[in-house]
Image (cartoon, rainbow, N blue to C red):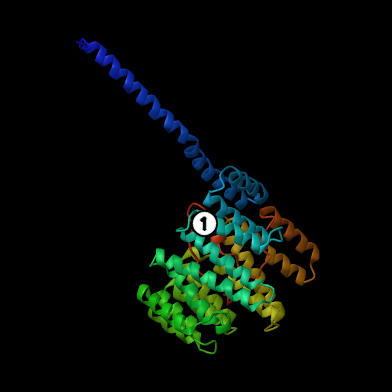
Amino acid sequence: MKKPASLKTEINKYKGTYFLKVLLFFGLCMLFVPYVIQGQSSKKLVMKAYQLRMNGKTDEGKSILDQVLLNDSTCALAWFELARTQHHMLLGGGKSSVNEILHLSNKAVKYDPENAGYLFLQANNYYLNAYVSDGSEKDAKQYIEKACKCFKDVFSLFPDNKEALLYLVDTYASLPENMGGNKEKADFYAQKLNELDKASGAEAMALLMPDSSDKVQYWSEIYNSHPTAFAAEKLGKAYFYSEDIANGAKYLEEAMRLDPAKNLLQLDIGRAYIMMLMQQKGDKNENMALAKKSFQKFLDNNQNEINPYKAYCIGWMAKLENFSGNSEKAKELVAKAKELDPYFSNAFGIPSQGLYSSPGHVELYFSSYFRPF
């Protein structure tokens, strides 16, 4: 008969098995450590690239993003930030293309398909491709349909998202049927918005109104009933469309007083006077002086604003100086703008805040593709 093992033998046997298990456990853990560290460092590097971009070192930031994706090709955050970086560069005349930017945003959605910020970026890049399409009505319509699908996906994921619904209303209401317009769909999403939020519902109703409608009266009634920053902004912009820039500026200034976060409206005031100059309406010298004053006021009141918006503002001041025949002053201002942001936007419209918000905390914004304000 086999002699029973002693208690000491059994304990030693157990200890040996236990330590083998511990070693195996920690060995497996170590296999995954590089991936955990890689994920953490990727996020930190993306944030560093973004901060460099905000501080006028966009090329350095882009190089970091390229390296991140070389090491971690599934990092959705890096694809997202690279797409925004390329868009930023394109606005300032950099070497990029709308097709490349769309490709990058598609990658971000591929690796994180339920991120509303990534879907918004993808949708906006579909719009951009539709805008610059080579005259093919079919291609442009397909891009618009894909953009609308992105916004519908956002609405499905986040049923309380107002911005996605506003884009759908604006698109379906503004475009002709052969380009994807659909009045019934516009009405449907406007009703959804009204059920969700009365202020956004009022904006949706304004988008449905014909251009010949008296929108000053419409927004005046709303503002008189609810004198909020939102209503003041909409009333001010309605005045802009009726070419009453003075009253428009008055209400936009009121909107900024009620909500200082709406500080970019100061740039809209300057742009409104520039539109009058471009259309040769009103007194040229007065409009130019008021535009300059508005842009200078933005710089004076927003010294802590991010560089891209300050540079954009200075860029407009340079154009006004050039238009006035002060080419040397214009060159000085352009140099100053490039020092802040080598790729400052040369577009007429104010770049979306979604282009410059922190990649770790993306906010969603609505800005019409069919109207200048």
Q: Position of residue 332 (x, y in %)?
A: 76, 59
Image point (50%, 42%), residue name: 39
Residue on which disc 1 sits: 110
Side (left or right) of 211 relative to 94:
left
Dot 1, how many residues are within 10 Å of its Cα: few (below 14), some (14-19), or many (20+)? some
Is any part of residue 53 visible from this angle? yes
Where 231 falls versus 44 (above or below)?
below
Instruction: Note whether residue 294 is visible.
Output: no
* Position in image of residue 57 (x %, y %): 66, 49
Q: Quadrant of residue 95?
A: bottom right
The quadrant of the image that shows the C terminus is: bottom right
Vertical comparison of 336 with 134: above or below: above
Q: Is residue 312 left or right of residue 160?
A: right
The answer to whether 221 appears left or right of 43 in the picture is left
The residue that appears at 59% across and 57% down in the rendered structure is 104
Residue 41 percent coordinates (x, y): 52, 40
**Above or below: residue 19 compared with residue 106:** above
User: Amino acid under label 1?
Assistant: Lys
Q: Position of residue 240 (x, y in %)?
A: 57, 80
Residues 74 and 9: in front is 9
**Quadrant into which the N terminus falls:** top left
Q: How many marks?
A: 1
Label 1 secondary element: helix
Residue 266 figure quarter: bottom right
